Image (cartoon, grey):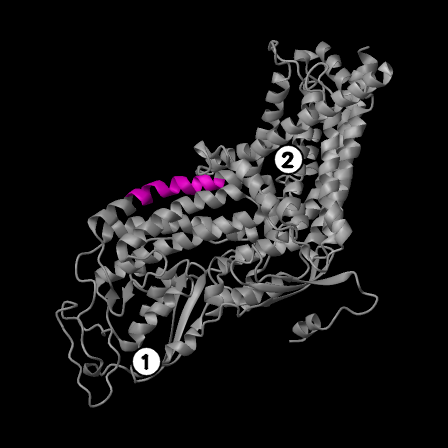
Amino acid sequence: MNETATLDIPVSQGDEDRYRLKLGPQHPATHGVLRVDLELDGETILDCDPQVGYLHRGFEKLAEHRTYAQNLVLTDRLDYIAAMANNVGYCEAVEKLLAIEVPERAKFLRVMVCEMSRLTGHLLWLATHALDIGAMTVFLYCFREREVLLELFAELCGARLTTTYTRLGGVRQDVTHEIMMKLDTFVDDFPACIEEYETLIDTNRIWLKRTIGVGQISGEKAVDLCLTGASLRGSGVDYDIRKHMPYAAYDQMDFEIPLGETGDTYARYRCRMEEMRQSNYILRQCIEKMPPGPIVCDDAPDLVMPVKPGRKVEVDTSARNGLIKLIEDRDVYMEGDIYVATEVPKGELGFYFISDGMGRPYRMHIRSPSFIHIGALATMGKGVMVADLIAIIGTLDVVLGECDR
Amino acid sequence: MLFYIREIMQILIIILQIAVLLGVVLLHVAYVTYFERKIIGHMQVRMGPMIVGWHGLLQPIADGIKSFFKEDVVPEQADKPLFLAAPVICLVAMLAALAVLPFAEGWVLADINIGLLFIFAMSSLASYGIILAGWASNSKYTFLGGLRSMAQVISYEIPMGLSLVGVMMLSGSLNLTEIVTAQENSILSIYLFPQAIGFFVFFIAMLAETNRVPFDLPEAETELVSGYITEYSGMRYAMFFMAEYIGMMVMASIGTVCFLGGWNGPFAIPFFPPFWFILKVYGFLFLFIWIRATLPRYRYDQLMALGWKLLIPLALLNIFLTGLFKILVP
């Protein structure tokens, strides 16, 4: 708190070399609407104080007035770069709360879309991170591959970004043969694309100079700052929910968790590049192992509003293959609280529910990795130069939609 | 009376020559932007401008008209006279540097004996425009851009000057025409091979001097929004833009004249002697663009370290070696 206060009072007399700069919220490198209040001496940052809230939409409060099924669409708008992963994270949490068992095929489909969205997330991260450091061409190369994935999303569920693909108890649409064929081609081609990005920047002397030793953070410190995802693994801490607390079908997948050693921007960059390769490998396994069967479980909750006592609602049960059931039919809305975390591209996305058995959350808290990573920016940004701060914002991989919620 | 007429005619001819040169160069500047956008576009798996004219050929003209009719916004807090003057200083200094460039044998406006020094003076003067723009806008981003530019120009003017000392020693002249003629005795009639170190230093310093990637720190868009041109709009913005591209062309011309044998080529082109000169200049410009599409950006302190710790010692070594060569091989 004290640090925040020092940035509010003017620079003291005789110390006019220091000056204040409000970087953002409409700055090109702040990945949305992040504002960072800086105190500078020349180009060196003396004090750094990130300000959030420019994209606040009140999702957590909003969720208290909507049913569990309706809240699903809110999760698209968290990390809009990887909406699929948020959908899966939310559904995993609610299903655990309601004790719903998901069919095997749906689990595999969830892993598949999760890894596809991890690729879109990481591709966008690489694109913007490279652009922040000045390598413009990588940006467009990444978007070329990202476009393929987004087109596949559109083919799968009709939307490129706000997908709302999963359902409580399964997924919304099944994959067609064409989608699988296209994905198969993509998975075949993608490793060569990663190599293409690497030829541009991996051993580039300027890239190395700009990333090695920049934003260095030890494993202990990273844990203290609650970093998750590749930002934590870059410091050598082996923590990946997909591996250590498997959800969906991750326990049947064979993949490795790439770890960095040095904990600097370059280590995190390497980590994410390797993660892309692993994701690609998981996608390959999904294509090969995809089991047949239903995509939604039989007792999945419906999409209608909870019925007020004493009111009977007629529902056309043929509309959704007889899956629609009235809320009042279910008595599984338990009381109590639950926290379930999943691994989204940015890190650990957790949903915390307090349920009072009414069919809608009494309280929904979202533990978003971006918010916590921005918190770490205050520590990591001190004493570096302005250009490094931009690199650190890039390497922490923040999305303000998820941070502000 | 007749005497005066001749004088007046001479002045008129010079004015005509200047007008033609300006016209040709500005047209080239317009199409260098097109050239850049197209090349970078294709390097980045996209098409570049395609809408205005066939394959976007009229795009530069549309851009020119657009910037000409845009509102010229002056920020309220700005230092008005300096803010208005800065782009003019930049552009005029760069245009003045064109006067001494020999495009072909005898195709030069002012064949003066200190041609090389004159160009240095003018390109340093242009950086005043940048610094003043950064200062007068009264905005923190432009201020940082101005500071960076000041430090960068001072640091890179020195290795650039030193890298050309070797050429001066070999040719024994500062006159650009004489430098070209002196190269005819060298290997392949270019100084590139005897002055390889000098060329290396010159090339890097040239990128820095023109604020191009990987040294585009004064206008690093992801750090300083647009650096010193953040507050500019309309024609004044276009003036900075033109100054930057003329600067690129001037630097490419110096490189051509001092290291690549100017207008001399493998065989003479009839009726159009500057052919090889223009080809070489465009070769340089292509390198500028290629580098822009490939490399990330240096950090401010790394840029300083590169200039002072690597380029200046290398340039001094080059001078020493050239001197040794001159003594040993008379």
Query: Which residue is label 2 attached to?
Result: B245
**Residue type at numbered disc 1:** Arg
Residue in the foreground of this view, choosing between A286 and A364: A364
> What amino acid is at disc 2?
Tyr
Compared to residue B233, the image places residue A366 above or below, namely: below
On what subunit does the disc labeled 2 rest?
A: B
User: In x, y percent, where is residue A199?
Assistant: 49, 38
The lab-note entry on whether marks 2 and 1 share a chain reads no
Q: Residue B270: percent from the left, percent from the top?
A: 60, 9
Task: Select label 2 or label 1 by which is in front.
Answer: 2
Residue B213 visible to an observer of this rendering: yes
Where residue A174 sits: x, y (%)? 21, 57
User: On the rendered image, what quadrant is the N terminus of chain A found in?
Assistant: bottom right
B153 or B270: nearer the viewer: B270
In the displayed structure, does residue A211 sit left or right of residue A56? Answer: right
Disc assigned to residue A360: 1
Q: Chief secondary structure of the magenta span?
A: helix
- Check residue A190 for magenta coloring: yes
Image quadrant assignment for residue A154: bottom left
Q: Which residues are magenta?
A: A185-198
Using the numbered discs, state the Cα–Cα distance from disc 2 to disc 1 in whole angstroms: 62 Å
Residue B277 against residue A389 in the figure, above or below: above
As for residue A74 lying within the magenta part, the answer is no
